[in-house]
Amino acid sequence: MSGVIARPRSPMTDALRGIQAPVMDRLERVVEEMHRMITSDLAMVEQVSAHLLGMRGKMFRPTLLLLASDLEGKPEPRAVTLAAVIELMHLATLVHDDSVDHSATRRGLPTVNSMFSHQVSVIMGDFLYSRALRALVTVRDFDVLRVITDVSSELSMGEMRQLAAIDALSFGEDEYFLLIRAKTASLLSAACESGALCGAPRFRDALARYGDRLGMAFQIIDDILDYTEDESVTGKPSGNDLREHKVTLPLIAVLPALSAAARRRVDQLFSDDQPSDEAIQDVMGIVAEAGGIDAARRRGEQFAIEAEDALAAVPPSPARAALVDAIAYVTDRRW
């Protein structure tokens, strides 16, 4: 296999390669394991699986799991299987999210629901989950099983939290943090904790906390990028959250302080089933001018500091250094 990442080189790509360097050989095996797990004799499943594996991301979650397993230099072979399980679960959540949101593209490629159908998308997401859980059973470890099945429930509850927010503009900071902890941070935390259980179990709690705080920072930065970067950078249209009437931290941070006129423009966008590009750009400008981007970035940086603090008890090693570098990668991230 030629490599895990098949994207044009950039400073951020180089940074990620540096983070992955201590585990790159095993990361290649994770991709092979994913292929093995979802092989099927049904032509449609093979077709959709090939599309999904072709559009996979940078393998960040498996990287974290493998690094966590290597903190004491004695990683167990089962970490490769668990890393594949985590990435399949991540892919399943993306497939389901795209179907729920009716998204047409992800990472610059057509989503499963736009390329096939919403029915295929839902069933394929379920298939990925089932194959991941089937592989998980082979590990024969109740601690690991509990961590990963718990996060499976969290991921579903996160999606339900988002759908249950009937009045989007009443969605506050506390609700936002609960949502992103369920939808994003829980999986990064599970990756790090289950990785620690495969080679450095005494750091299990520290790595779970590290993954949680890193995940919170990751999602906040992702939400900032939706306001600040265009599709060529993020792989999805800018302002997509506003287009889908999703309220994220940059907007939450400034809503109480907006002028009456600015608030009316925000309300108008959220009352429009299909807001125009001009309306989206207008609200993005309102949020930036009111300081929403800076306020969200400060919260993301605080979570990043807490992620580094969680590693304080972990002794120096190449794997620990890579986990520290992963924090900077998340906070400085460009897709």
Image (tube, grey):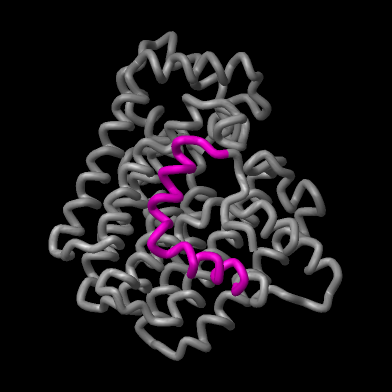
Residue at 46 percent of width and 55 percent of height: 60
Q: Is residue 10 magenta?
A: yes
Q: Residue at x 38, y 62 (%)?
A: 22
**Residue 39 position within the rendered picture, expressed as x and y whole percent measured from the top left:** 73, 75
Q: How many marks?
A: 0
What is the quadrant of residue 286 in the picture? top left
Rendered position, 167 above or below 202:
above
Q: List x then y, in percent, for residue 179.
A: 41, 50
Specify the farthest residue to the top: 261
Residue 326 percent location from the top left of the image? 34, 50
Is any part of residue 176 visible from this angle? no
Of the pair 330 and 32, the residue shown nearer to us: 32
Residue at 66% across, 76% down: 36
Is 228 a magenta residue? no
Describe residue 52's horizontal placement relative to residue 230 as left or right.
right
Q: Which quadrant of the rendered structure holds the N terminus?
A: bottom right
Residue stretch rendered in magenta on the structure: 9-33
Name above or below for residue 190 compared with residue 199.
above
Majority secondary structure of the magenta segment?
Answer: helix
The residue drawn where x is 51% and y is 42% is: 166
Question: In this view of the protein, which residue sits in the foreground, 138 or 253?
Answer: 138
Q: Is residue 99 above or below residue 272?
A: below
Task: Say above or below: 146 vs 187.
Answer: below
Instruction: Determine the image quadrant of residue 313.
Output: bottom left
Residue 52, percent from left and from top: 69, 57
- Looking at the image, residue 252 sits to the left or right of residue 271; the answer is left
Left or right of residue 22: residue 46:
right
Question: Is residue 225 or residue 170 the one in the foreground?
Answer: 225
Q: Is residue 78 visible?
A: yes
